[in-house]
C-alpha cells in the first residue's frame, strides 16, 4: 500500500528548494507505468496529538499545531507557519503510521512523502517539522509491541533528528549512511553512522552497503524496518555531494529490500529528499524504488 494525499502537493507559503510537484507526478507515473493500481493507494488519516507525542515533546507539538512556534524556531525549520502546513504534516505522519501497519500485514508499504528525519523530539529544522518514521516506530513499540526496530536512513543527509529521538531507546537501532561534508554540519550520534567522503561513487557506496547490511540484520535481528530512501545521493543532485548514478541508486534500494524480504521482515519506506535540477531525474529515481520493491516482494 502507498500513502498519498493530494495535500502533499500543495505549495507552502514560502520559497524553498523542495519540489512539491514531484508528489503528484510520482503518483501519476506509478499508475501510468502499471507499477501500482488505483487500489494500491490510500489517503491517510491525520496523526493525532497522542500519536505525535510518542516521539515529540507535548509542548513542541502544541506550539506546532497552534501556530505559536517562536519565530526563531520557524526560521530554523525553513517554512512559514500556516494551517495548510500543519494539515500537510499531520497527514504525512499519518501516512507512515498507517503504512507501517499495512507492512506488518503485507510485507512492504510506502509513503510518497515522508522521510522527515531532521525533526527532533522538541524542534524542527531542515524543512522537517514532525518525524514521520520516528512517530511510527514509537507507535509500533508502544501499541503493537513490535521490537526491535531498525531504521535504515540512506538519504544523503544524516538523520540527526531520528538519532536524537532514539538515543536512549535501545529497542530502536538507528543507522545513517550519508555524506560527511553535507548538512547537518553538526551531526548527532546514530547507533551506527557511516560518513562518506564527497564524490563517493556507485562502486564505493554499494561496497559499503553490502558490508554493513548483514551486520545490521544479523546483530540486531529487527522485527520491523523503516527505510528512508532519499534520492539526493545522485550525482546530479544540487545539494548532494555524492556521485551515484540512477543505476547505483536503484541497486542501493534492491539491497535493502532483498535484505528485508530474505528475512521476512516487514518494511515501511518513506521517499525522502531529491534536488536534481531535472524533475524527471528525481521521478525516475523514486519510481525505481517502487519498481524494485514490486519485483523483490512480488507484489
Image: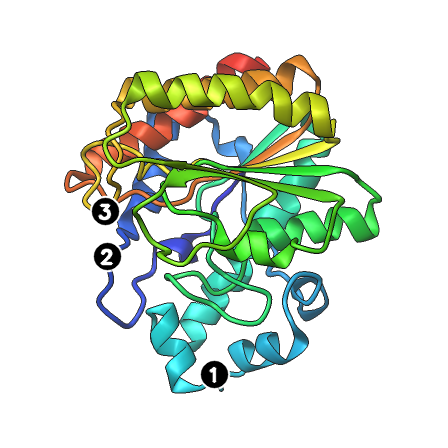
Q: Secondary structure at mark 2?
A: loop
Q: CA distance from mark 3 to mark 1?
A: 28 Å
> Which residue appears farthest toward the left when viewing the image?
277
In the rendered image of this protein, does residue 254 appear above or below residue 37?
A: above
Q: Is residue 258 above or below residue 223?
A: above
Lower sequence index among marks 3 and 1: 1
Q: Quadrant of the C terminus?
A: top right
Instruction: Assess disc 1: are there few (<14), some (14-19) or many (≥20) residues with their C-alpha within 10 Å of its C-alpha.
Output: some
Quarter holding the N terminus is: top right
Q: Residues within 10 Å of mark 2 (few under 14, many from 20)?
A: few
Q: Please identify, in this view, whether the residue under mark 3 or under mark 1 is nearer the observer.
A: 3
**Mark 3, mark 2: which one is toward the viewer?**
3
Q: Which mark is residue 69?
A: 1
Identify the residue at horizontal 35%, vertical 45% (top origin).
273
Measure the C-alpha gap from mark 3 to mark 2: 10 Å
Mark on residue 17? 2
Q: Which residue is mark 3?
A: 239
Image coordinates of residue 277 in percent, x first then y, are 15, 42
Amino acid at each position: 500500500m502507498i500513502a498519498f494525499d493530494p495535500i502533499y502537493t500543495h505549495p507552502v507559503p514560502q520559497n524553498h528548494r523542495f519540489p512539491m510537484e514531484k508528489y503528484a507526478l510520482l503518483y501519476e507515473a506509478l499508475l501510468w507505468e502499471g507499477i501500482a493500481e488505483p487500489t494500491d493507494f490510500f489517503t491517510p488519516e491525520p496523526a493525532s496529538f497522542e500519536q505525535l507525542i510518542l516521539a515529540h515533546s507535548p509542548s513542541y507539538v502544541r506550539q506546532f499545531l497552534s501556530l505559536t512556534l517562536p519565530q526563531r524556531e520557524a526560521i530554523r525549520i525553513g517554512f512559514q507557519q500556516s494551517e495548510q502546513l500543519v494539515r500537510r504534516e499531520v497527514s504525512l505522519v499519518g501516512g507512515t503510521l498507517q503504512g507501517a501497519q499495512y507492512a506488518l500485514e503485507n510485507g512492504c508499504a510506502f509513503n510518497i512523502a515522508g522521510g522527515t528525519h531532521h525533526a527532533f523530539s522538541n524542534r524542527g529544522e531542515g524543512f522537517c517539522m514532525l518525524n514521520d518514521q520516528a512517530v511510527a516506530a514509537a507507535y509500533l513499540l508502544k501499541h503493537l509491541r513490535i521490537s526491535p526496530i531498525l531504521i535504515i536512513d540512506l538519504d544523503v543527509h544524516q538523520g540527526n533528528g531520528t538519532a536524537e529521538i532514539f538515543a536512549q531507546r535501545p529497542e530502536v537501532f538507528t543507522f545513517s549512511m550519508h555524506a560527511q561534508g553535507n548538512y547537518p554540519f553538526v551531526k548527532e550520534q546514530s547507533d551506527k553512522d557511516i560518513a562518506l567522503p564527497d564524490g563517493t561513487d556507485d562502486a564505493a557506496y554499494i561496497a559499503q552497503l553490502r558490508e554493513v547490511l548483514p551486520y545490521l540484520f544479523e546483530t540486531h535481528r529487527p522485527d520491523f524496518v523503516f527505510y528512508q530512501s532519499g534520492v539526493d545521493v545522485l550525482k546530479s543532485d544540487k545539494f548532494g555531494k555524492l556521485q551515484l548514478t540512477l543505476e547505483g541508486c536503484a541497486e542501493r534500494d534492491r539491497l535493502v529490500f532483498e535484505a528485508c524480504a530474505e528475512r521476512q521482515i516487514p518494511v515501511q519506506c518513506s521517499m525522502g529528499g531529491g534536488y536534481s535540477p531535472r524533475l524527471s531525474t528525481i521521478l525516475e529515481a523514486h519510481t525505481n524504488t517502487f519498481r524494485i520493491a514490486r519485483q523483490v516482494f512480488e507484489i
